[in-house]
Image (cartoon, grey):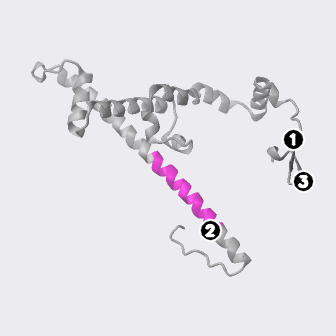
């Protein structure tokens, strides 16, 4: 679709066709961005698996005294730093991001869901205090399952009970602009 030649505008119908073509292309672009970010998050997940596999290997190697491995965790960290040719901070950043993403996946959240929500790979490398704000916005798997199993009527009832303002009648808003009155413009 993006490779299609643009519709030539010669009249109103062709103008509408060109706008519709542009709109379809925009949707394709959005889908492409979501797919790319989803893949980027999956790439980070593959690093999670590498860390897990290295930890298992480190445990195995540690049993042989000739390998001189005191702790498996420090061996894994040193191995990653050496192979990737990165410093302590970069390795720690990778490991923290992997741990955070692993926990979300264990909760049943997919990379596509994260990408559609606007998450990026770099979101998992932020300071702990900022990450905790992000986590506070993510409901637990149990909560998500209980919400999705509720009927729409029951969910509306719960939400209106939890938020009494939602059932109260809203005041009409009157806005005047350049002598013209607009009522409830904010609700449109």
Q: Quadrant of the N terminus?
A: bottom right
Whether residue 161 sits left or right of residue 88 in the image: it is right
Asked if marks 3 and 2 touch (Cβ < 8 Å), the reply is: no
List x then y, in percent, for residue 42: 42, 42
Q: How many marks?
A: 3
Q: Nearer the viewer, mark 1 or mark 2?
A: 1
**Residue labelled with disc 3:** 179
Callout 1 crowding tier (Cα within 10 Å): few <14, some 14–19, many ≥20: few
Say which quarter of the image contains residue 14.
bottom right
- The magenta span reads 20-38
Q: Which residue is mark 2?
A: 21
Q: Tag 2, which secondary structure?
A: helix
- What kind of secondary structure does the magenta stretch mostly adopt? helix
Mark 3 or 2: the one toward you: 3
Specify few, some or many for label 3: CA neighbours under 10 Å numbering under 14, 14-19, or 20 or more.
Answer: few
Q: Which mark is residue 173?
A: 1
- Decide which of tag 3 and tag 2 comes sooner along the chain: 2
In the current view of this chain or complex, which residue is farthest to the bottom? 10
Taking the image as shown, residue 127 lies to the left or right of residue 6, namely left
Q: Is residue 30 magenta?
A: yes
Q: For the residues marked 1 and 3, what is the alpha-carbon distance in whole angstroms?
A: 16 Å
Residue drawn at (65%, 78%), measured in percent from left and top? 9
> Which residue is at 51% across, 33% downward?
108
Whether tag 1 and tag 3 are in contact, CB under 8 A, the answer is no
Above or below, 85 against 39 in this view is: above
Q: Residue at x 64, y 72 (%)?
A: 18
Q: Is residue 181 above or below residue 127?
A: below
On whether residue 7 falls in the magenta region, the answer is no
């Amino acid at each position: 679709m993006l490779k299609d030649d643009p519709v030539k505008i010669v009249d109103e119908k062709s103008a509408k066709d060109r706008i519709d073509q542009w709109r379809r292309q925009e949707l394709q672009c959005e889908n492409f961005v979501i797919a790319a970010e989803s893949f980027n998050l999956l790439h980070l997940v593959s690093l999670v698996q590498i860390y897990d596999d290295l930890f298992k290997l480190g445990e195995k190697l540690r049993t042989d005294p000739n390998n001189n491995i005191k702790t498996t965790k420090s061996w894994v960290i040193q191995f990653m730093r050496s192979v990737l040719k990165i410093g302590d901070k970069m390795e720690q950043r990778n490991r923290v991001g992997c741990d955070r993403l692993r926990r979300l996946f264990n909760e049943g959240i997919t990379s596509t869901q994260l990408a559609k929500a606007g998450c990026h790979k770099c979101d998992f490398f932020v300071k702990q205090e900022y990450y905790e704000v992000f986590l506070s916005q993510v409901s637990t798997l149990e909560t998500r399952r209980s919400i999705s199993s509720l009927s729409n009527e029951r969910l509306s009832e719960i939400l209106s009970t939890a938020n009494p303002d939602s059932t109260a009648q809203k005041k009409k808003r009157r806005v005047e602009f350049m002598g013209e009155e607009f009522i409830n413009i904010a609700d449109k």
